[in-house]
């Protein structure tokens, strides 16, 4: 399948999905969402796929929704090979029933949390920053809040959404958002992948 805004690869029972809209900080458009939905549906149906790895190209993992494209759909670039979907990213990831690991090497901004936190496990590089700046332009991250509530008490989650401040990977680990911080050896990540792939996939 030829995708416009993502890349996919299957190797040794691992399906790797890479966000690939680097010039726009991997901000997602309706087409991006439809491509992710299509790719995850393919991975779900493929018995050879036991694990999803989610990554992104460029210095920003994902800057959230491309507001200009959502306000003016003519700015989007439809993929004629993909049927458009009318579901949120949260709903799309909820319907994916295989283990998943997000590997974050660039900053996670706004709706980028929807992708990162939707995975079963989340790893980040030490330099990564996380932020929910929507409130600075008059928007409230309701969908992200719903995900944050799975990881932390309500008032802590609300604080992140209301103040919109940036925080480090170390803080994200303390808040329970990260499973681990990646070091040069990636020992923890590799051990996790090994454990998942050695288990019976039917479970």
Image (cartoon, rainbow, N blue to C red):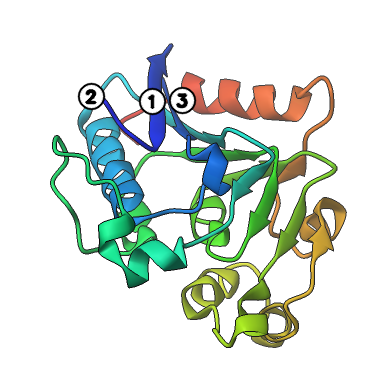
Task: Residue 67: give x, y in percent of width and height.
Answer: 45, 68
The residue identified by callout 1 is: 8
The residue identified by callout 3 is: 199
**Foreground label between 2 and 3:** 2
Give whichever of discs 2 and 1 has the lower sequence position. Answer: 2
* Image quadrant assignment for residue 11: top left
> Which quarter of the figure is the C terminus placed in?
top left
Mark 2–mark 3 CB contact (< 8 Å): no
- The span from disc 2 to disc 1 (Cα, nearest Å) is 9 Å
**Foreground label between 1 and 3:** 1
Task: Residue 49: give x, y in percent of width and height.
Answer: 34, 24
Secondary structure beneath dot 1 equals strand
Secondary structure beneath dot 3 equals loop
> Which quarter of the figure is the N terminus placed in?
top left
The residue identified by callout 2 is: 1
Task: Residue 164: give x, y in percent of width and height.
Answer: 72, 77
Residue drawn at x 19%, y 56% is 85
- The span from disc 1 to disc 3 (Cα, nearest Å) is 23 Å
Residue drawn at x 77%, y 23% is 187
Residue drawn at x 53%, y 47% is 24
Mark 2–mark 1 CB contact (< 8 Å): yes
């Amino acid at each position: 399948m030829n995708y416009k805004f993502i890349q996919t690869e299957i190797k040794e029972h691992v399906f790797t999905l890479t966000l690939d809209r680097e010039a726009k900080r991997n901000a997602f458009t309706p087409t991006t969402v439809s491509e992710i939905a299509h790719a995850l549906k393919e991975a779900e149906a493929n018995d050879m796929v036991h694990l999803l790895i989610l990554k992104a190209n460029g210095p920003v993992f994902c800057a959230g929704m491309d507001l200009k494209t959502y306000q003016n759909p003519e700015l989007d670039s439809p993929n004629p090979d993909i049927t458009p979907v009318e579901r949120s990213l949260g709903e799309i990831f909820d319907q994916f029933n295989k283990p998943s690991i997000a590997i974050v090497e660039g900053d996670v901004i706004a709706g980028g949390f929807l992708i990162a936190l939707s995975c079963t496990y989340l790893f980040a590089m030490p330099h990564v920053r996380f932020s929910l700046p929507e409130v600075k332009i008059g928007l409230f991250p309701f969908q992200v809040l719903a995900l944050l509530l799975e990881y932390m008490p309500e008032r802590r989650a609300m604080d992140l959404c209301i103040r919109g401040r940036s925080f480090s990977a170390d803080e994200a680990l303390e808040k329970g958002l990260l499973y681990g911080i990646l070091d040069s050896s990636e020992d923890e990540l590799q051990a996790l992948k090994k454990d998942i792939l050695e288990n019976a996939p039917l479970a």
